[in-house]
Amino acid sequence: MRKALHAIAGLLCGVALLSSCATGTDAVATGGTFDFVSPGGQTRIFYDPPADRGTLGTLTGEDLMNEGEMISLDDFAGEVVVLNVWGQWCAPCRSEADDLEQVYQETKDLGVAFLGINVRDNQRDKAQDFMTDQQIGYPSIYDPAMRSLLALGRNYPTSVVPTTIVLDREHRVAAVYLTELLASDLQPVVERIAAEPTEDQ
């Protein structure tokens, strides 16, 4: 009976994960990199202490709003970085956009940067219009084919949209959200990570 209950619980967690625009896998830190294996279908995963955190691979791509210009995670050295995978076609992405912008505005003076990754939007102008209409102040990589995500290999949950990943100042993965977010969910976590001492302190 207990095994049956665990199986049902796991199935329900899987159904809950499907409330995102796509399905995804789980997350586990291993040997300085990440294999995403979400125990029990968790949609909010935290890595503490910092020594337990792994790193992402190289992340770079064309700036959504500035055709021909490249943007990279390396452009934000020493900053906490909040990565958000989104598409203008994705209802949860549209819903959380103002919350993400709010957290960006409230934390940027703490050394926090946001970087969007726009996926599966084959019409660039629609994604640009979304950024303008929502008054999004932080940049996004334009990645309709998801190539920049694929460059991260198995280190990244490429099939869940929206996904938000919070990186500490050394760009180690501190938190992963495989679900739509409210500002009240994200801001306390970002502020806590921004307040962590660095190796130089």
Image: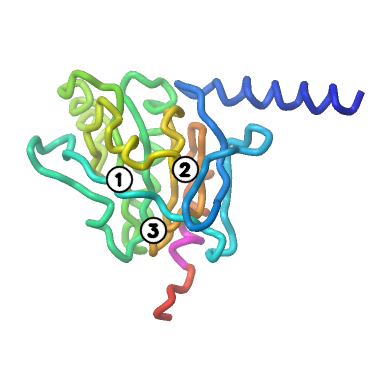
Q: What's the mark number on residue 115?
A: 1
Inspect the image, locate mark 3, and give the three-letter code of the amino acid beneath it. Answer: His
Inspect the image, locate mark 2, and give the three-letter code of the amino acid beneath it. Answer: Ala
Q: Residue at x 80, y 28 (%)?
A: 6
Q: Quadrant of residue 47?
A: bottom right
Q: Position of residue 146 (x, y in %)?
A: 30, 30
- Secondary structure under tag 3 reads loop
Do residues under tags 1 and 2 come within 8 Å of each other at their CB atoms?
A: no
What colour scheme was applied to this rendering of the protein? rainbow
Q: Quadrant of residue 125?
A: top left
Magenta segment, principal secondary structure? helix
The residue to which callout 3 is attached is 171
Point out the image quarter for the N terminus.
Answer: top right
Q: Earlier in the sequence, mark 3 or mark 1?
A: 1
For label 2, the crowd category at 10 Å Cα-Cα, with few meaning under 14, some 14 to 19 and many 20 or more, is: some
Q: Earlier in the sequence, mark 1 or mark 2?
A: 1
Depicted 156 relative to depicted 47: above or below: above
Q: Position of residue 63 (x, y in %)?
A: 17, 40
